[in-house]
Image (spheres, rainbow, N blue to C red):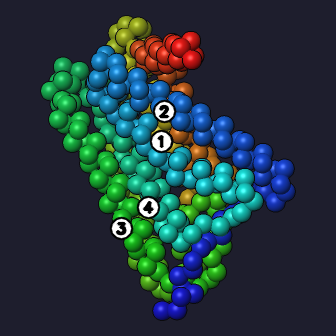
């Protein structure tokens, strides 16, 4: 095949044409990125350091924080660099790397949210068997399955997508490298293989979604049977953050890919991508810490410890 079938670089969709708006977007993305790093970093540190949080729920939350950090780091730094340096290019290898890790983290997050729903189902519907079912070995195996499934998905999709000849230019209608946008550049019927893989992945994700919905139907039925108001409130407080995070992620990503054709435009695609790939990693730590007093106390303890260490360093300096 000719070298033109595999371009050396791709052109990403810019957020704005004027220099002032480009710098504004750089500042906005920088703020969101720092908030995501701080929030998820605090959760990672709190869960790792506080032995009271060494439970299945917080173990999965630690994995969610890792996934959120990976998701936002895959897309936002390159977008910030392009806005700052007034460029839209990304190398062929850089695009392939971005696609690979984005698929890893998005697939892993969907699978992890499904497992977290199962964890809440066992905790509320079968509390007497929770310690037996959700032991440490089972939790580690579940987390390993989440990450390995994400890597397997990414390997299949990335290798298949970047083996396709591209002869419809190199301009992507998105601010990061995304498989559907790359498929639009293909001029070969071989792209149907990747479409088939996407359909299979969509069916698997739909199965996870059905499992998640059924789990919460059982959870709400069990919670409503709890006689005391305090007991119902405690049960809901452990479920609502996960339900909010799952709803935010699933609704945004589903609408982004299944929206009506009449709503398909460059600007709409751009901001919908921001909603499902950039906003959730920054909001998830806030959602989880708002209704969880134990996590809030641990995060506050970590912050105070860091502040004290900083004061000591400054005093010695």
Residue annotated with mark 3: 156
As drawn, the label of residue 27 is: none
Which residue is rendered at x = 52% and y = 52% of the image? 74
In this picture, residue 138 sits left or right of residue 46 = left
> On screen, 133 above or below 49?
below
Q: Could you tell which of marks 1 and 4 lies nearer the N-terminus?
A: 1
CB under 8 Å between callouts 1 and 2?
Answer: yes
CB under 8 Å between callouts 2 and 3?
Answer: no
State how far apart marks 1 and 3 are (Cα).
22 Å
Residue closer to the observer: 198 or 309: 309
Residue annotated with mark 4: 100
Nearer to us: label 4 or label 3 = 4
**Mark 2 nearby-residue class (10 Å; few <14, some 14–19, many ≥20):** many
As drawn, the label of residue 40 is: 2
State how far apart marks 4 and 3 are (Cα).
9 Å
Per the image, label 2 sits on a secondary structure element best described as helix
Nearer to us: label 2 or label 3 = 2
Which residue is rendered at x = 52% and y = 48% of the image? 73
State how far apart marks 2 and 3 are (Cα).
29 Å
Residue annotated with mark 1: 68
């Amino acid at each position: 095949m000719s070298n033109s079938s595999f371009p050396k670089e791709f052109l990403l969709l810019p957020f704005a044409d004027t220099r002032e708006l480009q710098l504004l977007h750089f500042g906005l993305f920088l703020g969101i990125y720092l908030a995501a790093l701080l929030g998820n970093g605090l959760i990672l540190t709190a869960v790792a350091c506080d032995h009271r949080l060494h439970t299945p729920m917080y173990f999965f939350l630690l994995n969610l924080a890792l996934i959120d950090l990976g998701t936002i780091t895959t897309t936002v730094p390159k977008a910030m660099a392009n806005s700052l340096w007034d460029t839209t290019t990304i190398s062929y290898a850089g695009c392939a790397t971005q696609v690979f890790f984005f698929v890893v983290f998005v697939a892993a997050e969907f699978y992890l949210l499904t497992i977290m729903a199962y964890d809440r189902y066992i905790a509320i519907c079968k509390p007497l068997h929770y310690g037996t079912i959700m032991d440490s070995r089972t939790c580690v195996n579940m987390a390993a399955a989440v990450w390995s499934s994400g890597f397997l998905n990414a390997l299949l999709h990335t290798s298949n997508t970047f083996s396709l000849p591209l002869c419809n230019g190199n301009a992507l209608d998105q601010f990061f490298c995304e498989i559907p946008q790359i498929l639009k550049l293909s001029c070969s019927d071989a792209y149907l293989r990747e479409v088939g893989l996407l359909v299979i992945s969509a069916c698997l994700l739909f199965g996870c979604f059905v499992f998640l919905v059924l789990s919460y139907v059982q959870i709400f039925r069990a919670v409503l049977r709890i006689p005391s108001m305090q007991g119902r409130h405690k049960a809901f407080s452990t479920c609502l953050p996960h339900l909010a995070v799952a709803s935010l992620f699933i609704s945004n990503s589903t609408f982004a890919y299944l929206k009506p054709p009449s709503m398909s435009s460059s600007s709409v695609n751009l901001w919908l991508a921001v909603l499902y790939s950039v906003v959730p990693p920054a909001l998830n730590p806030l959602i989880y810490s708002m209704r969880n007093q134990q996590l809030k106390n641990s995060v506050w303890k970590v912050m105070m410890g860091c502040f004290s260490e900083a004061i000591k360093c400054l005093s010695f300096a």
